[in-house]
Image: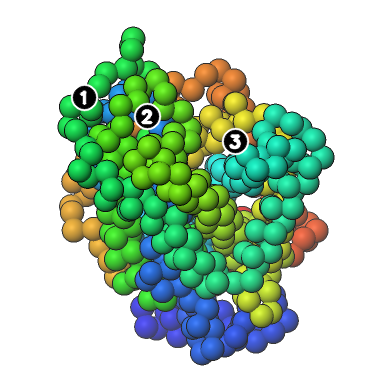
């Protein structure tokens, strides 16, 4: 391996110089063999605490939106769901993310994993599925902020459809995208502040509710039959995207150590951020399950602690939406950057801002797609995003197991301490749920997801054509292939895409 690295290193430097017209120093300092920037750029690296809160906002952002689970199945099943699901679903995906992010610590995350396991078509398709799911989620947050502002400014409330609401959504999207451009370190520490401020009212509500809780209230049943489809969809939407931070692995300080620790803490933090407020609100109020619509947690806070606590939780919902927008936009942008580094997208998507080091072209492109999606009907689009995410995660689990079985030579600084059969069993539980999500989707979702999947395959073919005809400039993928230890020889540009 040392001899191979000595052979590859000069090629990497020459190739990078040829493609970028620069030395391999990159933004802010010299680049190491993994593409991580050294020197002054270390100040822009994500450390443990910002990574924890970026994962927190990628996955949850607080208990907002969990109310529909109570309406669908009652308090008891909701509490059990948010106790069990973060561990049955979140732990397997977190362990997969921790091992592969440490083994392949470059930007692009799960795209790299599928690319290394099954080739560039699989990486490109997985990237398409996950990216579309991501931007559909992002588009919901400025609209949610406008909904809360609509309580104060009726002209921007939902259903008005006027210019003021459109301007608010567009303006909020552009402003938050600019914040994302200022730097990942700023976004990370901003996530810490937003997380603490938005979590604080739930902590206070839980403390105030303790003497008012009555366990019998947790056993109240819904009227009629339980809506299990709504219940599981609510759990799923509140507790997915554990792997999203992997797309920024190249920006994390010592990812082989930081990722496993951050994911472990995030699992506990996210489980507690749902379970404790729900225990407090269901145990200290007498509201029947059918009154639990979106936003009821703020009403429950008003009953438990007074109007000031209600207003704080409503403000926390806005801050949480901002945090989720920033975290997921960063994930989507660095995914595009990673795909460009692998040669799956044109090299322009790997362009970084001079001062902040952020992928400004990828941010701009993601902002444009988000704006386009913001004004579509979300009924089937959101369900389609759910379906695409499920397909992508099933492929992700398959890539993880395949790499364990076939790439024993891959250096794994963190390794899930289980043999392959146990790993397969570990992945089987979330995979069964993902399969359920796919099966219960309606025919329109199947049709739309099929069309978008065909679009992803077509995009891959179009990129191959553009590369072969030299219509667009691509990175060759040599650097990425060498980072991922892909065989004994460097993979050529023509072989990769």
Kindly state the secondary structure of the residue where label 3 is placed: helix
* Residue 309 against residue 260 in the figure, above or below: above
Distance between the alpha carbons at the discs numbered 1 and 2: 14 Å
Distance between the alpha carbons at the discs numbered 3 and 2: 30 Å
First in sequence: mark 3 vs mark 2:
2
Q: Which mark is residue 344?
A: none
Q: Which of 43 and 479 is in front in this view?
A: 43
CA neighbours of label 2 inside 10 A, class few (<14), some (14 to 19), many (20+): many
Q: Position of residue 399 (x, y in %)?
A: 39, 49
In the picture of the structure, the residue carrying the numbered disc 1 is: 219
- In the picture, measured across the screen, residue 44 lies left or right of residue 344, that is left
Report if residue 101 is visible in the image: no
CA neighbours of label 1 inside 10 A, class few (<14), some (14 to 19), many (20+): few
* Residue 276 against residue 183 in the figure, above or below: above
Q: Which mark is residue 453?
A: 3
Distance between the alpha carbons at the discs numbered 3 and 1: 43 Å
**Residue placed at 51% from the left, 90% from the top?**
39
Q: In which quarter of the image is residue 19?
A: bottom right
**Residue placed at 74% from the left, 53% from the top?**
171
For the C terminus, the image quarter is: bottom right
First in sequence: mark 3 vs mark 1:
1
Instruction: Give the number of the mark in front: 3 or 2.
Output: 2
In the picture of the structure, the residue carrying the numbered disc 2 is: 69
Instruction: Give the number of the mark in front: 1 or 2.
Output: 1
Instruction: Give the number of the mark in front: 3 or 1.
Output: 1
**Residue placed at 33% from the left, 12% from the top?**
223
Report if residue 129 is visible in the image: yes
Report the colour scheme.
rainbow
Kindly state the secondary structure of the residue where label 2 is placed: helix
């Amino acid at each position: 391996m040392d001899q191979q690295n000595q052979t590859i290193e000069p090629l990497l430097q020459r190739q990078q110089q040829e493609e970028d017209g620069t030395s391999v120093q990159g933004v802010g300092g010299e680049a190491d063999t993994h593409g991580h920037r050294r020197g002054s750029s270390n100040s822009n690296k994500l450390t443990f605490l910002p990574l924890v809160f970026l994962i927190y906002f990628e996955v949850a952002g607080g208990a907002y939106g969990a109310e529909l689970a109570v309406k669908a199945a009652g308090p008891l099943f909701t509490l059990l769901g948010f106790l069990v699901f973060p561990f049955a679903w979140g732990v397997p995906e977190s362990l997969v993310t921790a091992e592969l992010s440490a083994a392949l610590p470059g930007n692009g995350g799960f795209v790299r994993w599928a690319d290394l396991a099954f080739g560039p078509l699989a990486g490109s398709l997985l990237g398409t599925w996950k990216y579309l799911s991501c931007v559909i989620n992002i588009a919901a947050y400025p609209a949610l902020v406008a909904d809360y502002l609509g309580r104060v400014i009726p002209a921007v409330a939902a259903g008005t459809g006027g210019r003021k609401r459109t301007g608010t959504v567009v303006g909020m999207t552009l402003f938050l995208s600019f914040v994302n451009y200022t730097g990942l370190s700023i976004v990370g520490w901003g996530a810490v502040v937003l997380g603490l401020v938005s979590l604080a009212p739930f902590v206070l509500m839980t403390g105030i509710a303790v003497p008012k809780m009555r366990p019998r209230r947790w056993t109240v049943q819904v009227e009629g039959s339980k809506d299990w489809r709504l219940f599981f969809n609510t759990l799923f939407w509140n507790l997915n995207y554990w792997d999203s931070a992997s797309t920024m692995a190249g920006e994390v300080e010592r990812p082989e150590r930081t990722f496993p620790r951050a994911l472990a803490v995030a699992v506990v933090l996210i489980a507690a951020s749902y379970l404790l407020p729900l225990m407090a609100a269901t145990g200290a109020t007498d509201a029947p399950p059918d009154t639990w619509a979106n936003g009821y947690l703020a009403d429950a806070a008003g009953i438990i602690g007074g109007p000031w606590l209600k207003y704080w939780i409503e403000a926390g919902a806005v801050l949480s939406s901002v945090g989720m927008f920033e975290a997921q936009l960063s994930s989507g942008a660095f995914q595009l950057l990673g795909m460009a580094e692998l040669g799956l997208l044109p090299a322009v998507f790997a362009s970084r801002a001079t001062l902040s080091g952020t992928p400004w072209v990828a941010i701009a492109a993601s902002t444009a797609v988000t704006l386009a999606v913001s004004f579509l009907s979300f009924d089937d689009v959101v369900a389609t995003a759910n379906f695409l995410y499920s397909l992508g995660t099933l492929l992700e689990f398959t890539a993880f197991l395949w790499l364990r079985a076939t790439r024993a030579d891959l250096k794994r600084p963190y390794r899930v301490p289980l043999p392959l059969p146990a790993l397969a069993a570990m992945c089987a539980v979330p995979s069964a749920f993902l399969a359920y999500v796919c099966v219960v989707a309606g025919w329109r979702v199947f049709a739309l997801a099929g069309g978008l999947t065909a679009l992803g395959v077509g995009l891959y073919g179009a990129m191959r054509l553009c590369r072969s005809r030299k219509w667009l400039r691509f990175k060759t993928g040599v650097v990425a292939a060498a980072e991922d230890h892909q065989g004994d020889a460097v993979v050529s540009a023509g072989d990769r895409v």
